[in-house]
Every structure is written in structure tokens, then in C-alpha cells.
Amino acid sequence: MKRIAKISTGIIAGFVLIFATTAFVISDPKPDFEKRNINLSDYFSVSKIESDNSRIGTFKTAVKFQMKNYNNLEKEFYGQEIIISGNPNVDRILIGITNNLISRIEIWNNKKLVKVKEIGFFNKMTWGDTQTMTVQFYDETNTKYAEKSGISMRFFEGQGIFGDIGGTRLDLTNYGNFNGDKTIKLFSKSIDSEKASKPKFLDFKIWKNHQSFD
């Protein structure tokens, strides 16, 4: 029995090593844009970023997130805002997390909230630790999902292999054309009042025309 247990443990360890090695090998390449210190007032235009990647109509972002003060009774929302040009149905998409442990997407147009999607976290979050928030976006010009558009978000700790905390996605195909310029900024807002806490955002990255493996 001991020998069987040792063999089983060895097999499991081998699978873990293979999985970890594979994840490292197929990890994202160097980003096309990176800014270590960022402010909530910073704007980043995807169209102005130069890239050698070939996945037209896609981009991925990543940012480090840290928030110590979460004992606020008011509901707050933190994340990335994508400002859309040339779409009469959508001019802003907000995607991220709330302080009551929910992944959230907001669709806005002409200062009106068009749609909200929320889903609870599926793993524990430790406030004060540093987590990573990644967003992937593709419009109808992409080749992988031809004539479709969508957005997704992952929120995780560490490398994300076993540290996923939350995430969400939304099919945008029925909301019109998204192939115009996309501008990105970070945000922190209260859903219940005018003021919101300010989390720490660091190391913001953009991969343009790139389809990630995650």
C-alpha cells in the first residue's frame, strides 16, 4: 500500500510539474505597452500602441491591484473602463470587482446604464494582498470568433494557475460595432454615493492584437 501511495503521489507531482511548465512556456509574451505607476486620471488609447502581433481586433490588459480598506458599508466598484468610439449603442464598458466580493460588468451609453452583470467570487480573497486583474476584449474584426465581439475578466493571486478568485465575461455581439478606437482607464467608484475608496493600481500592461492563452 505504501508503494502504491508513493507511486500515486509521484504521478500527481509529475502532472503538477507538467502543468506548471506548460503554463510557463505558453505564457504571454512581452507587453506592447507598460506603465509601472499609474493614476486614475490616465488614459491609454489602444490604436496608438504599436505591435507586431497579428491577432487583429483583440487586446489584453493586466494590472496589479491592492486594497486594504474594505470595511465600507457602501458598495464600491474597482477596475478597468473601456471607452468605445463609433458605436451608437455603447460608449463605455466598466469591468472589475466590488468590495462585496462580486465580479461586475456595466454597459453604458449616453450616461445611461444599459446592462449590469454580476457573479460572486468562487475563491477567497485576502484584502491587503496584491492581486492581478486581466481583461480581454475582441471585436468583430477578429479571426478566432468571426463577426462576434466580447469581453472577459480574470481576477487572481500569484500566477493564476491555482489562484483564481473571480471572473466574468459578456458577449457583446448584439450591442453593435466595436471596431472603432478603444481607450482604457482605471476607475474606482461608489455605486451608492459620490465618494469611493482609492485602491492601489500598479504595473499596467497592454498586449495589442494578441489572443492570450488564459
Image (spheres, grey):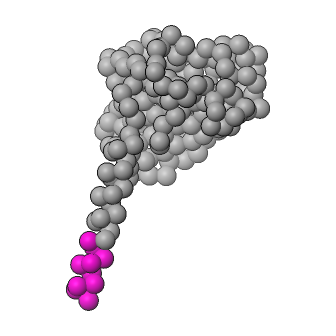
Residue at left offset 68%, top offset 22%:
178
Dividing the picture into quadrants, the one containing residue 24 is top left
> In terms of depth relative to the viewer, which is nearer, 142 or 3?
142
Across and down, in percent, residue 168 comes to 57, 41
Along the horizontal axis of the image, is 138 left or right of 37? right
3 inside magenta stretch: yes
Along the horizontal axis of the image, is 203 left or right of 61? left
Task: Judge whether 15 appears above or below 99 on screen.
Answer: below
Dividing the picture into quadrants, the one containing residue 95 is top right
State which region is magenta: 1-10
Residue at left offset 55%, top offset 22%:
81
Residue at left offset 39%, top offset 43%:
26
Dividing the picture into quadrants, the one containing residue 42 is top left
Across and down, in percent, residue 72 comes to 44, 33
Residue at left offset 69%, top offset 28%:
140
Q: Quadrant of the N terminus?
A: bottom left
> In terms of depth relative to the viewer, which is nearer, 52 or 166?
52
Across and down, in percent, residue 199 comes to 39, 26
Task: Tell me, yes or no, if residue 148 can be seen here.
Answer: yes
Assign the magenta stretch its main secondary structure. Answer: helix
80 inside magenta stretch: no
Task: Tell me, yes or no, if residue 76 can be seen here.
Answer: no
* Count of marks, rendered view: 0
Task: Judge whether 151 appears above or below 7 on screen.
Answer: above
Which residue sits furthest bottom?
1
Across and down, in percent, residue 103 comes to 54, 40
